Amino acid sequence: MYLATVVISLITMIGFAIWLLNHTAKTSHIVPIESAKRGLALLKQAGMKKLNFAGGEPFLEPKFMGELAKYCKKDLKLESVSVVTNGSKVTSKWLDTYGQYLDIMAVSCDSFNEATNKAIGRGNGAHIDKVKELSQMCKDHGIKFKLNTVVNRFNFEEDMNHAIQEIDPFRWKCFQVLMVKGENDSAETLRDARRFWISNKEFQQFCTRHNQQTSLVPEGNDVMKSSYLLLDEYMRFLNQNVGQPTKSILEIGVAAALKDVYWDEEGFEKRGGVYDWTKPAESDHSNPNLDW
């Protein structure tokens, strides 16, 4: 198994989780930045080319993430560094300082109807305007802009074609809402995704309605569950749906940890895991005098 084309998501290095998609937040642990850099260097040595910061909300720790992005691009020279965010904490100040080290910003937007966003739990009524603002900010900083949409019970009948054409993301990732046993599938778990669940047929209806969008990348449950290599807050690989996390790569190294993780390489390829993920070369927009 190689990491040459794998997206590594540092899900809870900042102590949170992607709601309804990946690992549910269970701790608030933040790995020390020097330990994080050591782990990233190990992954680079193992062949990693792309890193994706996800959460929760990575921008709750802006300097921490920015310094790691800088390290990945400037020192490790990764092909791509990306981040998934809800957009609420992204600032011009951060982009001026660290934007040069970011290839892709993926912003979560589940609906272009604010009432639907509120019903889902996304934003307070101004999320769509923020998404449009971030799209322009990314263009101004030469960062590829991506949209992530979780297709669920509240939005699967929505027609988003006009809004997608207006925003014009380079990639529009549409995930079928995923329930993970023991993490978001009951009243006893931190999150309960049962009211968001849709069938495969309903997900396909949504995708068919938007199939003229060239940026559309649909991702159903069949390819999502184990096609990501994910690290938690202790730099352990997660075994989604199939077992316990591995030991930390800081303790046993990447090769040993990979022996104990299940990764669906076929699913990774099927969902379009390899794509044009490096932004064009640009000038230095950083401002080293900004105080964090």
Image (cartoon, grey):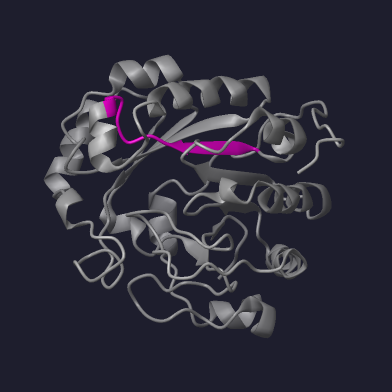
Q: Is residue 255 above or below residue 186?
A: below
Q: Quadrant of residue 159?
A: top left
From the viewer's perspective, tell me whether residue 157 is left or right of residue 100. left
Residue at 68 percent of width and 66 percent of height: 43
Q: Nearer the viewer, residue 239 or 48?
A: 239
Residue 276: tell me if it is visible: no
Image coordinates for residue 194, horizontal then vertical, percent? 17, 57
Q: Quadrant of residue 179?
A: bottom left
Residue at 44 percent of width and 53 percent of height: 269
Residue 109: tell me if it is visible: yes
Residue 202 belongs to the span the image colors magenta: no
Looking at the rendered structure, the number of numbered marks drawn on it comes to: 0
Residue at 22 percent of width and 65 percent of height: 185
Q: Is residue 69 above or below residue 45?
A: above
Find the magenta span and give its range: 103-114
From the viewer's perspective, tell me whether residue 145 is left or right of residue 91. left
Residue 112 belongs to the span the image colors magenta: yes
Residue at 76 percent of width and 44 percent of height: 292
From the viewer's perspective, tell me whether residue 181 is left or right of residue 171. left
From the viewer's perspective, tell me whether residue 42 is left or right of residue 209. right
Q: Is residue 126 above or below residue 220?
A: above
Image coordinates for residue 151, horizontal then vertical, percent? 26, 41
Q: Which image quadrant: the N terminus?
A: bottom right
Q: Nearer the viewer, residue 235 or 276?
A: 235
Image coordinates for residue 34, horizontal then vertical, percent? 77, 67
Image coordinates for residue 163, horizontal then vertical, percent? 35, 19
